Amino acid sequence: MGTTAKLWKKGRGKLGAFDPLLGAWFAEAGSPMGPIRCQRTFEPILAGKYLRLTARWAIGRGERKKIYEEEAVIGAGDGGAVTFWSFTSDGKRSQGTLADVKDLHPEAVGFEARMPAGLARMAYWPAEEGGFHFVVEAKKKKGWGRFVDHHYRPLLLGSE
């Protein structure tokens, strides 16, 4: 019985699972509100004890284009569990902890968070053609319902 080759080389320590995400990435997708372009940047901060995620969504086009931004910090929370703290431009905030999301992909890494509407999760995993997949899902009676599904590719300097 053969083994599947790993696509991601994870680093050491509690945040090592996020090493493949370090850098700047972009995704383009359609939505009921028009085209979406999202840029995500992951970078170590505070002597590498935490990671900062900066996300900027441009939704729609022309005069109707809306910008939605997120700043998040990932690191050890109370009790040492890997946690994220997220703050968004619409004034909302959320917090979640590392969760087992291997049902999506054997190398997936993600979080679960209790939101006002219920349990949600977000996850990242390597794309065979390069970059990574990112999804956001909400827990439903019959499993997870996906409402964001993006394929991120490296953002090249000067391409934005």
Image: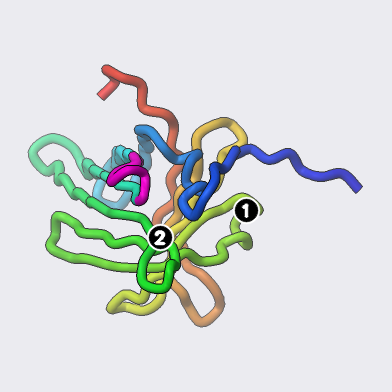
Task: State which region is magenta.
Answer: 42-49
Q: Neighbour class for label 1 at 10 Å: few (<14), some, many (≥20)? A: few
Does residue 158 lie above or below 130 as drawn?
Answer: above
Q: Which residue is at the far right?
A: 1
Q: Which residue is mark 2?
A: 147
Residue 65 position within the rendered picture, expressed as x and y whole percent measured from the top left: 14, 42
On the question of residue 137 being in view, the answer is: no
Does residue 4 lie above or below 111 as drawn?
Answer: above
- The amino acid type of the residue labelled 1 equals His
Residue at horizontal 38 percent and vertical 71 percent from the top:
113
Does residue 67 lie above or below 76 as drawn?
Answer: above
Q: Which residue is at the far left?
A: 63
Count of marks placed on residues: 2
Residue at horizontal 40 percent and vertical 55 percent from the top:
148
**Image quarter of residue 6:** top right
Residue 54 is left or right of residue 113, and the answer is left
- Quadrant the C terminus occupies: top left
Residue 17 position within the rendered picture, expressed as x and y whole percent measured from the top left: 52, 49
Identify which residue, 108 or 117, lies in the foreground: 108
Is 46 contained in the magenta span?
Answer: yes
Distance from the alpha carbon under mark 1 to that under mark 2: 18 Å
**Image quarter of residue 74:** bottom left
Q: Which residue is mark 1?
A: 105
Residue 81 position within the rendered picture, expressed as x and y whole percent measured from the top left: 44, 67
Residue 60 is left or right of residue 32, and the answer is left
Residue at horizontal 57 percent and vertical 53 percent from the top:
108
From the image, state whether disc 1 or disc 2 is nearer to you: 1
> Tag 1, which secondary structure?
loop
Is 130 contained in the magenta span?
Answer: no
Residue at horizontal 48 percent and vertical 41 percent from the top:
19
- The amino acid type of the residue labelled 2 equals Phe
